[in-house]
Image: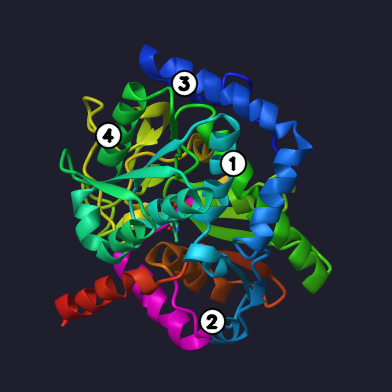
């Protein structure tokens, strides 16, 4: 795996720790605790045992035979993170961080959530460990993802509606950081993606690296060789960095991250940071962000709440600039079409986030030879999105 970040949390120019003084102390405490945990075999043994017995890993790597035949090109495999407990990859990280919280003696867990998937994963982990849990969520996202709000409450979490700004994920992040500053002694901030100030991007990547590690073993078992390409959707970037991490050292493997193109690359209509964004500082890190000339965050849009975010994880900014990975986008329409296609050809209803990765495969696989092996990370299941799909169809009609 890559040696980055350096000990200040930089991936080339990106990452770092751009926070007010009040947040420095808890971040340094967290970093020290994480560094100690990484050297403790018992910590990883317990994490691995929970991956198996609580999350149900490993998740399958499935040859998508009918999708492959339909597209008529590359041989497509799906990494089935939708089959992980709670229905998405986010639980891998939530379980890792909650183990760290317990090790640090923290009893109160706070989190932010966009699609609600990270909130559900956090509430699940907190319930399983008997900890208090408060989840900040943009009011707009709460309306879009009502079933996940109810799910979190069933799991014993308190969901706090955030009414500021665009009432989406970035506003929820700000609110969670505010809470953390005021309640440092007993509170652990469980961040949901590979972003924010150091050490979060590294820590979240490490907890999601299991996706890539499994996929590598599984493709070797199935094909007796490494894949030619990997495709994953990129919101904050955790499922993508999790699967990329096992393959990044092998330069022959093409890595593609897929961002939300929304209604197309016009201001306020998308969340494709590498197509419409520029480097800047945002919520504790230096990375690509969607910003106006004054450095103010622009509004973003995506049909998928989990990809609808202003900034991207800093390791992706580094992979982008160093050209080790490339970043494409697909529009809402293309993602929704891929959602329907996977449902009908494979009997798998994908999350709208994951549908972006599928849509990129739909666009590119037909031009590739039949012996090209492509792995698409299916980051989550789409049950949470069926209401959105229904409304989408009504609006088109
Ligand atoms: C949250 C979410 C994403 C986007 O988050 P990343 O950190 O970029 O992985 C993608 N897919 C699903 C199913 C999600 O819930």
Whichever of labels 3 and 4 marks the residue nearer the N terminus, that label is 3
| CB under 8 Å between discs 4 and 1 | no
Q: Quadrant of residue 99?
A: top right
Q: Residues within 10 Å of mark 2 (few under 14, many from 20)?
A: some
Q: Which mark is residue 375?
A: none
User: Tag on residue 26?
Assistant: 3
Distance between the alpha carbons at the discs numbered 3 and 4: 16 Å
Ligand 1 location (quadrant) = bottom left
Residue 8 vs residue 298: left or right?
right
- How far apart in space, not on screen, are marks 4 and 2 (Cα)? 44 Å
Give the camera-side residue of 244 and 83.
83
Closer to the eye: label 1 or 2:
1
* Comes first in the chain, label 1 or label 2: 2
Q: Quadrant of the C terminus?
A: bottom left
State the residue position of label 1.
99
Q: CA distance from mark 1 to mark 3?
A: 17 Å
Is there a contact, CB below 8 Å, between mark 3 and mark 4?
no
Mark 4: secondary structure: helix
Q: Which residues are magenta?
A: 327-350
Residue 71 numbered tag: 2
| Label 4: how many Cα within 10 Å (few below 14, some 14–19, many 20+) | many
Q: Earlier in the sequence, mark 4 or mark 2?
A: 2
Magenta stretch, main secondary structure, is helix
Residue 101 falls left or right of residue 214: left
Q: Which residue is mark 4?
A: 175
């Amino acid at each position: 795996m890559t040696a980055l970040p350096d000990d200040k949390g930089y991936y080339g120019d990106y990452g770092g720790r751009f926070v007010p003084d009040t947040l420095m102390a808890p971040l340094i405490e967290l970093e020290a605790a994480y560094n100690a945990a990484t050297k403790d075999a018992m910590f990883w043994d317990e994490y691995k045992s929970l991956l198996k017995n609580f999350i149900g890993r490993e998740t399958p790597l499935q040859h998508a035979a009918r999708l492959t035949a339909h597209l008529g090109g590359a041989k497509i495999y799906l990494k089935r993170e939708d089959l992980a407990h709670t229905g998405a990859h986010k639980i891998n990280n939530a379980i890792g961080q909650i183990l760290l919280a317990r090790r640090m003696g923290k009893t109160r867990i706070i989190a932010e959530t966009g699609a609600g998937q990270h909130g559900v994963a956090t509430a699940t982990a907190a319930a399983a460990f008997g900890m208090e849990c408060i989840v900040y969520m943009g009011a707009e996202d709460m309306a879009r993802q009502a079933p996940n709000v109810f799910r979190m409450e069933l799991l014993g979490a308190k969901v706090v509606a955030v009414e500021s700004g665009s009432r989406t994920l970035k506003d929820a992040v700000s609110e969670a950081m505010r809470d953390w500053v005021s309640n440092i002694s007993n509170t652990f901030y469980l961040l949901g993606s590979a972003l924010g100030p150091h050490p979060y991007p590294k820590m979240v990547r490490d907890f999601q690296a299991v996706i890539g590690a499994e996929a590598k073993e599984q493709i070797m078992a199935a094909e007796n060789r490494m894949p030619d390409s990997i495709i994953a959707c990129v919101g904050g970037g955790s499922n993508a960095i999790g699967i990329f991490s096992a393959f990044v050292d092998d330069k022959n493997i093409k890595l593609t991250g897929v961002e939300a193109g929304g209604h197309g690359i016009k201001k306020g209509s998308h969340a494709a940071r590498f197509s419409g964004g520029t480097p800047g500082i945002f919520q504790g890190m230096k990375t690509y962000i969607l910003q106006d000339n004054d450095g103010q965050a622009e509004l973003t849009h995506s049909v998928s709440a989990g990809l609808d975010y202003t900034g991207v994880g800093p390791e992706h900014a580094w992979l982008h600039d160093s050209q080790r990975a490339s970043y494409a986008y697909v529009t809402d329409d293309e993602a929704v079409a891929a959602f329907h296609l996977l449902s009908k050809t494979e009997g798998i209803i994908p999350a709208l986030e994951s549908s972006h990765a599928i849509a990129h495969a739909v666009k590119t696989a037909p031009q590739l030879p039949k012996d090209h092996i492509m792995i698409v990370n299916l980051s989550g299941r789409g049950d949470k999105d069926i209401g959105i799909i229904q409304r989408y169809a009504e609006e088109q009609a």
